[in-house]
Image (cartoon, rainbow, N blue to C red):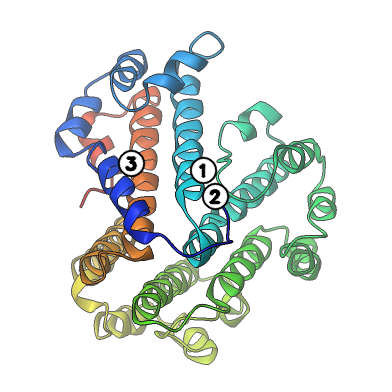
Amino acid sequence: MSAAGSPNPEYVVARVRARRGSLYGDEEYRKLTRMGPAEIARFMEESSYGEEINALGSRHGGVDLIEYALNRNLAEQFDAILDWSEGSLYDLIARYLRKFDAWNVKTVIRGVYTDAEQSAVEVDLIRAGEFDDRRIRRLLEADSIDGVIEVLEDTIYGEPLREAYAEFEETDVLVPLENAVDRAFYERLLSGLGGDEPTRQYESFLVAEVDFRNATNALRLARSGADIDPAAYFIEGGDLFTRSSLARLAQNLDELVEYIGDSQYGEELGPALRELEEADSLIAFEHAIDGALLAYGDRLGTIHPVSVTPVISYILAKERETENIRAIARGKEAGLSADEIESELVIT
C-alpha cells in the first residue's frame, strides 16, 4: 500500500489485533528463562517465529540464530502493517517506524567507536525503518564515525550529526552523537500531525515518549556527576521539561526525582522512582518507563479503537517482546540465573 488513498484503520486494526494475540505472555517468558539457547530456538520455531528460525537455522546457531530471527521477524511484521495501510494512516505509521533507522544509526556508531566486528554490529540492526539495504550496507562498511556521517548526509541525521561531531571529538564520548540522532527523529516525528481527536490523542502519546526520554537523560546526567550541560541534550516536543528546567533539575538528583514524582506521570513511575532513590542503577526506572509507555499506548487504543493508536500500541508490544527474548537469550549465554534474567524483562 502507500500514502495515497483514504486511511483504512478498521482493516489494519483488525489485522493487528489478530497478531497481538500471538505475543508471548508471562507464562512463555517464565519457560524461556529456564531454557538454554538451543531450547529457546526450538520453542520459537513452534510459535510465530517458525519461518525465520527455519530460514536462518542452516547459517546460524545459538544466540546469533535467535538474534537474527527476532530482527527479521520484527521487520517483516512491520513491513506487513505498512503494506496493509493507506493514506494518512500509512504516513503516521511510517514516520513512527523510522525509529529503527535512528536505532540502526546509533548501533553502527557504537560499533565503529568500539571497533566491533561488522558481523557483531549487523546482528543488532533492525531493518524495519526507511533505510534500504544499500544504505545499511554502506553504514556497515564505514570505518570511521566521519564516514558514517557521510553516508547520512542526505538524511535528517546528516546535519545534526555533523554539528555534534565537534563535541564528540573534544570529549570522546558518544552522548552528543546519540542525542543528535534522537532529536532529529523526534523533531520529524512530531511535525505536521493531523488535527482530529484520535490524532491529537496519538500526539499526546508521542509527547509522553519525549518526556520519558528527557527524564531518563536527566537522571543519567544527575547520576553521572559529569560536567556536561544537560540543556544540550534536551529533546523538543515534551510537556514535562523546558530546556532550562531540565538543565537545573539535572544538577540535583533528589529534586529531579521529586519533580517527576509530582508530575502527571507520578502514578505510573512512582514505584520506580522510590526504588531509584535507594538503588545505584537506573535499570529499574528505565524498565518502568518502558512499561508505562506500553500501558499508556494500550489505554489510548481503548479510547480510540479504530485509529492509529492500537497499531502503535502493537508496535511497542512487539518491540518489547523482541527485547525480552533477546535479554533472556543473552542472559542465558552469560550464565545468569532465571531470577536475574527475569529482573531484566519488561512485562505489563
Count residues near mark 3 (Cα–Cα under 10 Å), then give few for <14, some for 14-19, many for 20+.
many
Residue linked to disc 1: 79
Looking at the image, residue 342 sits to the left or right of residue 16; the answer is: left
Q: Is 68 or 307 nearer to us in this picture?
A: 307
Q: Quick check: 94 above or below 27? A: below
Looking at the image, residue 114 sits to the left or right of residue 303; the answer is: right
Q: Secondary structure at mark 2?
A: loop
Q: Position of residue 107 (x, y in %)?
A: 62, 46
Q: Earlier in the sequence, mark 2 or mark 1?
A: 2
Query: At 58% from the left edge and 61% from the top edge, which residue is drawn?
Result: 4
* Circles 3 and 1: CB atoms closer than 8 Å: no
Query: Label for residue 321?
Result: 3
* Residue type highlighted by circle 2: Met
Q: Earlier in the sequence, mark 2 or mark 3?
A: 2
Count residues near mark 2 (Cα–Cα under 10 Å), then give few for <14, some for 14-19, many for 20+.
few
Camera-side mark, 2 or 1 = 2
* Residue type highlighted by circle 1: Asp
Q: Earlier in the sequence, mark 3 or mark 1?
A: 1
* Residue type highlighted by circle 3: Glu
Residue linked to disc 2: 1
Q: Position of residue 277 (x, y in %)?
A: 26, 69
